[in-house]
Structures are given as C-alpha cells and as structure tokens.
Image (cartoon, rainbow, N blue to C red):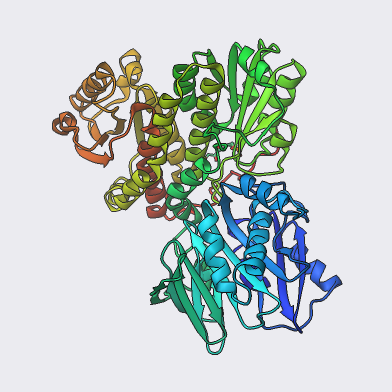
Amino acid sequence: MLEGLRRLEYRGYDSAGVAVLADGSIQFRKKAGKVAALDEEIAKAPLPASTLGIGHTRWATHGAPTDANAHPHVVDNGNLAVVHNGIIENFAELKKELAEKGYNFVSETDTEVAATLLADVLATETPGDLTKAMQLTSQRLEGAFTLLAIQSQFPDRIVAARLNSPLVIGLGEGENFLSSDVSGFIDYTKDAVEMGNAQIVTITPDSYEITDFFGNPAEGKEFKVEWDAASAEKGGFASFMDKEIHDQPQAVGDTLLGRFDDKGKLTLDEVNIDEATLRSIDKIIVIACGTAAYAGHVARYAIEHWCRIPTEVELAHEFRYRDPIVTDRTLVVALSQSGETMDTLMAVRHAREQGAKVIAICNTRGSSIPREADANLYTHAGPEIAVASTKAFLAQITASYLLGLYLAQLRGNMFADEIQAVVNELKAMPEKIQQVIDGEEQVKALGTEMKDSKSVLFLGRHVGFPVALEGALKLKEIAYLHAEGFAAGELKHGPIALIEEGQPVFVIVPSPRGRDSLHAKVVSNIQEIRARGAITIVIAEEGDTAVEQFANHVIRIPQAPTLLQPLLATVPLQIFACAVATAKGYDVDQPRNLAKSVTVE
Ligand code: F6R
C-alpha cells in the first residue's frame, strides 16, 4: 500500500495514512507530510501483518493538513475506517444532523462526516451489510467523492463508492485492488476494470461486484493497462503538463463545488473579515506574479463589471516597493497556486501593515499566504507538478469570479437570479473545456509544424488580452521561443512593425454574440496583420464565420459569454506550447532556469 501511495503522491502529498484489518481489529497510522513521513511513523510503530487495508495520500480541501485531518478517518469505536477523495458539498448539514444524534467529531473534515454517516447507516439500517450501507450513504452525499471503507466485522472486503471522482479496480491472482488510477497497483497487475459514475464496488480477494447507488447490478469494463510503471504516475500522459492540461475540466468543476450554503448563497472558505468591512471597501488590488497575475487581469474585467468597485492588478514585487496607496477600505486579493511565492507573500504583509484586508486565492492548503491572509478562497485544482502553470490558471479565474459574485451578492450589486445565471454558465464550463481538449490533435499538429518559428505573437482584446499574455508566457517558458502578447488595439501604436511575411500570430477572437464592437474590431485587426503577411491562427467560437476568410488556421472553441471565454481560449495556447516544446525535445515539466515555487524575492 505504501508503494502504491508513493506512486499516487503526485495527486496530493500533504498528509498520508493507512489502516489495516488484522485479527478482527482495525489499526491505523496517519501523518501530516509526505508518504516518507508515514513510513517513519510505521517504522517507529509497526503495523501487524494483514492482507486487507486502505491507504490515502491527501491534498487538503476541508481542514488544514494536520495529523488529525489526515485519512483514514476511523469511527465507530475503531471499527470502521474510511478514506476519501473529493468534496462532500452537504457535509455541514449532515454533520449537524449526526451531532444531534449524539455523534462527536475529532477532525474538521467532510470525510469524517461521511464515515460517521456510513457507520450510523450500517448500525441502524443495514446491519451486517456494508455494501448496502455504502449504497444508502452515497444516496445522501452531494458533491464529488470516492470513498473506500473497511469494517472490522468484514475481514475479506473493501467497499467503495464513486461520484464524479476517479476509481479503478485492479484484478490480481487471489488479490484485488482499488485505486484512484492504475498507478496505485501497476506493480501487481495490468488487468483493470473501469467503473461507471455513481457506482459502488465491493471487492474480496477473488471477486468484485458493481452496483449503482440503489443496488442495481452494473457491469464494469475490463481493460489491459498499457503503461509502464514510470509513466503511470503521469496517468499515461507524456508529461505532467500534458496531464494537467487534461485535468482542467475537473479543476474548474471542483473549484465550483461546495460554494453555496443551505440557502443557496455563495460562501467563502475561511473569512475573518466582517460583512460591514467588505461592504465598505472602495478599491480592490489584485496582487500576484506570472500566470497568476494574468488570471488577476482576467478577473478584473469581471469584478469591475459585476461589483462596480475600481480594481487594479499589480505584480506583487512592483506593488511591494512602490509605496502603493492602500487604506483600511482597500481589499487586496492575493492569487497564488503555491501559496509560497515570496514576492506575493511580502506584498500581502505590506498590504496588511497598511491596514488593508487580504483575501487569498490559493491552491495549497496550509501554505504561507493563506495562513497570513484575513480570508481564503481555495482553488481545488489538485497538485500542480509541471513548472508551467495550466490548471491552476483556470482554477484561479474560476475562484476570482466566485469572489466577484460573492462581493456583488453582499453589496447588492446583482440580483440573486443574475448571480445564478453566471453560476450556471460557470458550471457548464468543465464540459466545454473538455470539448476544447478533445480537439487537441489539430493544435498539436500546428505546434509541430511551427516548432522552428523564431517568434510567435499573440493578440487579444478585453479578457482576450491577458489570455494573449498567458499564451506568450507559456511558449517562452517551456519552448524557449520568443513570444509576445499584445492588446490588439495597441498593434497600430507600434508592434505592427514586427509583422513580416510568415510571422505566426495567434488571435483570440471575442464572441460575436457579445459586445458587437469588440468582435468587429478584432476581425479588423486580423485583416491588418494578414495583409502584411502574417500567418494567422485564429481562436474563435463555433459559428463565427466572419473570421474564416482572414485566417490561415481556425481553432474552434464552444460558445460562451465574453467574460468566461478565457477558460476556453487559453487551453489551445497551453496545448500549442506543450507541443512545440515536445517537438523541440525539451523537458516540458522542468524547463531550464525555473522552479515551481519561487520562494525568494
Ligand atoms: C508560469 C508560472 C509562474 C507562476 C508564478 C506564481 O507558468 O507558473 O509564472 O504563475 O511564479 O506562482 P504562484 O501561483 O505559485 O504564486
């Protein structure tokens, strides 16, 4: 199990734990930190020999990465152990209900609530049937989850459930496995079974049985794993970056989960800023670096539009040293995937010293920036391993939009139905992002074809402008290719002189269904550069035929409201950069001179 956890560590590595069943009792060890810390714990306090167990490596969503919040969660006087991935959206109301029944909780996690509910159902409704208990429990859980449970009465089985969160079955000789992906058992078997969504599985050493949440039998799809152990950690993708690009529908979907209270109102994760203060803010400053700063630029368009609060976006290192005007009515939003970027951390400290309130939007629980902020809104993108940020960018935009809507709700700038309409559009994005990814072959071919370009330019207007900047950054950092992003309107003020025969230029075209003038102006910009010999690669939404006559290549993205288009238009640019770097034979995940987390100023 420990070996399997090590292989799955790329999914999360802030704490780990295992529980085994031996001689009718469950024993467990769990520890904050990497699997190596758990190893040491087990070396100090060895576990008994056993042939049944569950393990987990965690990426915190509810509750900080502490020993107590690590999985497994063991309840029912030590008789039931559960591990869990995902987010249970209705955990607060279930917790209240269970507390009223007399249950106590020792952690802050949603997992302990699910485990307690399972124990309660098993004891009161389905005695002697763990599978049935899991079915009934799953019917009551909302959100996304994979749950695995063992119970001391059942020494030969693990029962698991999944809803919108991965789980695969591994079939061995007289032994069976469950894992989030095949890398967890690749050393033991290459025979695997794919389960459907919203299903339950019970495995014993020589059988597996799948049902839906209501007990109706279901079929799994058996398949042979074709990856070797080394590539399995990347889920079969050639690089972590490639994998993380493909993780994006889930990253955006997960970031949207669990954001509403029982009255349907938007909530943040940890807020120590009172509502009166939030109502009184007269300026927002978004501070961040690199890709996160571009996410901030995108967010600005939405926040100003929805909340009518003047919003600035500033590179954290520039903000810190320029004597910015910050008052106790300024809200500073710090965007950071790692939560450890020193430039951003220093800017957070500076802002707080000046009396500003700070909200952090970070991907890493328990990291420095959220620890020092007054309020937090976590992105749930999962660990990002590749140095070039991809899924964190989309999750940062999503979370910033939620913040904008939250402020609009609080300050009465938007009606509930207007907010709901945007939220519904946001909820449709994961599927649309998947559609863009499904078209990746066209973009990869372009990347290979253009690998020897000396320079690539990117143009965009409105929210398309920061997308252009992000597209250029991706290409610089992993393909070492000169690239620049421009505001399309700025072209005629100088950069158009760069255009010569054969110059590749990506153009992000706004929706023709949005603000008319925006679309028409960008189409004119395409004509201007095309007339001067540029090779135009146009990213335009389905049905936008106006661009076709001026485009050498059209990359189609699904229709979306103007403000949400960056969640789609960025994806081909990431795929393109990854393809160029791959074609040039570079290490896509660890580009030269860079580090994932920049912890020096
Ligand atoms: C680019 C990239 C960097 C980071 C920047 C901030 O692909 O990854 O530009 O976005 O270093 O990092 P975080 O978000 O961890 O603060």
Quadrant (top left, top right, bottom left, bottom right) of the N terminus: bottom right
Q: Residue 527, how many percent across, how many down?
A: 19, 24
Q: Quadrant of ligand 1?
A: top right
| Residue that sits furthest to the right in the current view | 44
Q: Residue at x 49, y 68 (%)?
A: 200
Question: Above or below — where is 565 with respect to 338?
Answer: above
Q: Residue 297, how many percent across, how many down?
A: 49, 25
Q: Residue 170, how many percent across, how many down?
A: 50, 77
| Residue that sits furthest to the bottom in the current view | 174
- 366 or 324, which is in the foreground? 366
Question: Above or below — where is 563 with respect to 455?
Answer: above
Q: Residue 164, how many percent across, how many down?
A: 47, 56
Relative horizontal placement of residue 377, taking residue 71 as reference (left or right): left
Residue 289 visible to the viewer: yes
| Residue that sits furthest to the left in the current view | 549
Q: Residue at x 69, y 67 (%)?
A: 81
Quadrant (top left, top right, bottom left, bottom right) of the C terminus: top right
- 160 or 377, which is in the foreground? 160
Q: Quadrant of residue 2?
A: bottom right
Q: Quadrant of residue 514?
A: top left
Q: Residue at x 25, y 41 (%)?
A: 556
Question: Above or below — where is 6 with respect to 550?
Answer: below
